[in-house]
Image (cartoon, coloured by chain):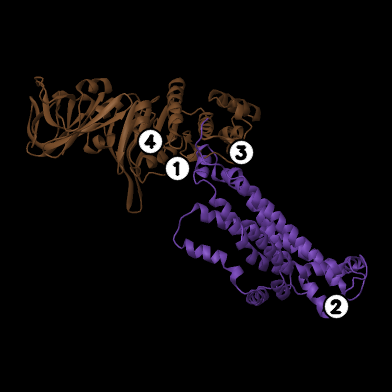
């Protein structure tokens, strides 16, 4: 088999994998525009009726608003915590650093059901159960490790002499933070904001346990599913998918912007 | 010496149990070009970082003029540094890099800042690069930006941490000339850390040789080259032969060291007692080389041996000679001089030198 044939086979294989992953989602999107009540072939005809129904449904728009509030707040808080955690790792040497990093990366490895139950009992104990604040806190816990990981990778590319160089030129540690560290980490911070927002946006389990009457969109979707099968669910699902993909794409663009611009090695003439 | 611009008074730096710098006493005069030199891990960079306020001395005192600097944070000092890795800000343009320090000072407005930064870029011959990003520059250009960034603050003291080590050979020599020129023009103090002796010898007025956190010798390049104070310095410089033996006489008539090759005279005084181990060093270019059969010149000390190898380094030739007791020595000569002798491997030669060209060091 020559190289070209191997390449074609591999490309075909990758396409199949993508198809396998995306087919259900594409089906869902396709049927969200179908005029028929039940998802069956042949396609009945194009319609925006289900989207109109979704936008008219107050529980959905409330859910969407809640989700946005939670996602934006989670993104900001988790990115801030992730940045602080990563910076501490970058700047300081201390005993127990491994344990510190392990602990900071732990939350996403805990089964979400456990996290959901733990959040429920804890939030109930401190009187926050059934509030959006509780959902935000729960989401920050699972999203912050992603923020830390992204920003930590970025900081690993920062010449250890850069920060002392700024001090040496008269910048106080705070000025250095604002003028050197944060600007350097900007692509990772943007990427982290998008990723943590995406994590929060489609998180279901914690939200389901602690949101109470303040349903987020994923929780609302489940409620809709339990009630009746309606193409409106396809419409909502398509919207959720669109937002999540958009956020992930933003994160990827931010990451690539810095991966491409890595400095060249020194040397050469001048 | 009038009041030194910087003084290190019994400065020590330790990290837990490991001592990076033992106890340094050093006075740096205004306008001096002083080089701290030694192998990696000798404490030279730690010393520089203490001068910059990036590391705090564990004991002792660092003074600038007469002000004690130990507790002054790095950002309140006026000792900018040129880093081995340049440490330029990658997300800022060349101009913004040079403006960075001025911006922190807040002594000028944006217009004045820009003008000053441009002036320094121009002075270093990279004004055309002002708008570029750091990743669009070559190593040599980055080096100039790093210099401009530090010099734009117009400090009294400039610290340089192996600034040329990332450059290739010919560029290094060019920057060396440039640094020496800048030092002459600006009249400020340069403290220069390096492990390359050619850099230190070419540029510095004074050299501090360090090893394992201790100062081995402080002196002019000539002092260090001709009269290394310790075996370490002699070996580190590598320009001298070291012949060890036992100190036999020490008095007004000079010093005599004896070993299996004979008795050798040396000038100068030493603290070494008669009967103790001692060595003397003789610079490779201070040795006369003749065929062993030729008549010996009176008044010189000499050994004979056989030619083991020749090495050409441009116009200078290094000849390695095996001595009868198993030691070897090396001689450096101009190529035309050696050519006249027409030596071949295995030829018997005599190495002779003036006793006043030797220096005694502890064995």
Q: Nearer the viewer, residue B161 or B171?
A: B171
Element type at marker 3? loop
User: How far from the left and from the top, in percent, is residue B75?
Assistant: 51, 39
Considering the numbered disc 2 on the image, is that residue within a helix, a strand or a loop?
A: loop
Q: Is residue B53 left or right of residue B244?
A: right
Question: Where is mark 1, residue-wise?
Answer: B54
Q: Chain of mark 2?
A: A
Q: CA distance from mark 1 to mark 4?
A: 18 Å
Residue that numbered label 2 is attached to: A229
Quadrant of image for the N terminus of chain A? bottom right
What colour denotes chain A? purple
Q: CA distance from mark 3 to mark 1?
A: 23 Å
- As displayed, is residue B359 above or below residue A159? above
- The CA span between labels 4 and 3 is 28 Å
Q: Are marks 1 and 2 in contact (CB under 8 Å)?
A: no
Residue B352, picture quadrant: top left
**Which residue was labeled with disc 3?**
B92
Which of these two is toward me, A122 or B66? A122
Q: Does label 2 lie on the same chain as label 3?
A: no
- Could you give the CA–CA distance between mark 1 and mark 2, rounded to whole angstroms? 67 Å
Chain-order first, disc 4 or disc 3: 3
* SS for callout 1: loop
Q: Position of residue B21 (x, y in %)?
A: 33, 44
- Labels 1 and 2 share a subunit: no
Residue at left offset 62%, top offset 47%: A260
Mark yes or no: residue A143 visible: yes
The chain containing the residue under callout 4 comes to B
Name the residue tied to disc 4: B194
Say whether marks 2 and 4 touch (CB < 8 Å): no
């Amino acid at each position: 088999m020559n190289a070209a044939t191997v390449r074609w086979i591999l490309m075909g294989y990758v396409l199949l994998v993508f198809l396998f992953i995306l087919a259900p989602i594409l089906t869902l999107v396709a049927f969200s525009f179908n005029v028929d009540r039940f998802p069956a072939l042949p396609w009945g005809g194009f319609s925006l009726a289900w989207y109109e129904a979704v936008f008219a449904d107050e529980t959905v728009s409330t859910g969407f608003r809640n989700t946005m509030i939670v996602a934006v707040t989670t993104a900001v808080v988790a990115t801030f915590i992730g940045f602080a955690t990563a910076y501490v790792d970058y700047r300081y040497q201390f005993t127990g650093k491994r344990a510190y990093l392990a602990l900071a990366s732990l939350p996403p490895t805990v089964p979400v059901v456990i996290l959901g139950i733990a959040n429920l009992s804890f939030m109930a104990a401190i009187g926050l159960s059934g509030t959006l604040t509780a959902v935000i806190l729960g989401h920050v816990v699972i999203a912050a490790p992603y923020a830390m990981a992204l920003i930590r990778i970025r900081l690993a590319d920062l010449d250890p002499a850069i920060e002392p160089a700024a001090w040496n030129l008269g910048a106080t540690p705070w000025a250095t933070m604002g003028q050197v560290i944060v600007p350097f980490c900007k692509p990772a911070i943007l990427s982290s904001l998008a990723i943590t927002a995406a994590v929060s946006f489609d998180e279901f389990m914690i939200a389901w346990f602690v949101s109470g009457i303040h349903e987020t969109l994923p929780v609302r979707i489940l409620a809709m599913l339990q009630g009746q099968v309606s193409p409106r669910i396809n419409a909502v699902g398509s919207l959720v998918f669109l937002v999540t993909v958009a956020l992930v794409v933003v994160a990827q663009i931010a990451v690539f912007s810095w991966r491409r611009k890595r400095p060249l090695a020194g040397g050469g003439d001048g | 010496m009038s009041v030194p611009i910087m003084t290190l008074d019994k400065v020590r730096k330790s990290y837990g149990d490991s001592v990076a710098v033992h106890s340094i006493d050093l006075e740096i005069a205004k306008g001096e070009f002083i080089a701290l030199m030694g192998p990696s891990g000798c404490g030279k960079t730690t010393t520089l970082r203490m001068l910059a306020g990036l590391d705090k001395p564990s004991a002792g005192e660092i003074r600038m003029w007469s002000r004690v600097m130990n507790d002054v944070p790095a950002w309140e000092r006026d000792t900018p540094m040129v880093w081995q890795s340049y440490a330029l800000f990658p997300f800022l343009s060349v101009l913004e890099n040079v403006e960075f320090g001025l911006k922190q000072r807040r002594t000028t407005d944006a217009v004045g800042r820009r003008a000053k930064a441009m002036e320094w870029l121009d002075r270093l011959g990279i004004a055309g690069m002002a708008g570029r990003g750091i990743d669009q520059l070559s190593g040599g250009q980055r080096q100039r930006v790093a210099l401009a960034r530090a010099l734009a603050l117009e400090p009294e003291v400039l610290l340089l941490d192996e600034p040329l080590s990332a450059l290739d050979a010919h560029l290094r020599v060019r920057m060396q000339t440039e640094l020496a020129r800048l030092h002459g023009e600006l009249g400020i103090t340069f403290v220069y850390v390096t492990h390359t002796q050619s850099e230190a010898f070419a540029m510095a007025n004074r050299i501090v040789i360090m090893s394992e956190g201790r100062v081995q010798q402080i002196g002019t390049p000539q002092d260090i080259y001709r009269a290394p104070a310790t075996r370490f310095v002699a070996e580190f410089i590598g320009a001298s032969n070291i012949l060890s033996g036992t100190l036999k006489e020490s008095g007004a008539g000079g010093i005599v060291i004896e070993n299996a090759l004979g008795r050798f005279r040396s000038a100068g005084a030493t603290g070494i007692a008669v009967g103790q181990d001692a060595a003397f060093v003789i610079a490779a270019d201070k040795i006369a080389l003749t065929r062993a059969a030729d008549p010996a010149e009176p008044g010189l000390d000499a050994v004979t041996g056989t030619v083991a190898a020749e090495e050409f380094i441009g116009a200078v030739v290094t000849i390695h000679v095996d001595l009868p007791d198993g030691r070897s020595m090396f001689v450096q000569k101009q190529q035309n001089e050696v050519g006249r002798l027409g030596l071949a491997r295995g030829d018997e030669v005599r190495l002779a030198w003036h006793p006043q060209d030797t220096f005694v060091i502890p064995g």
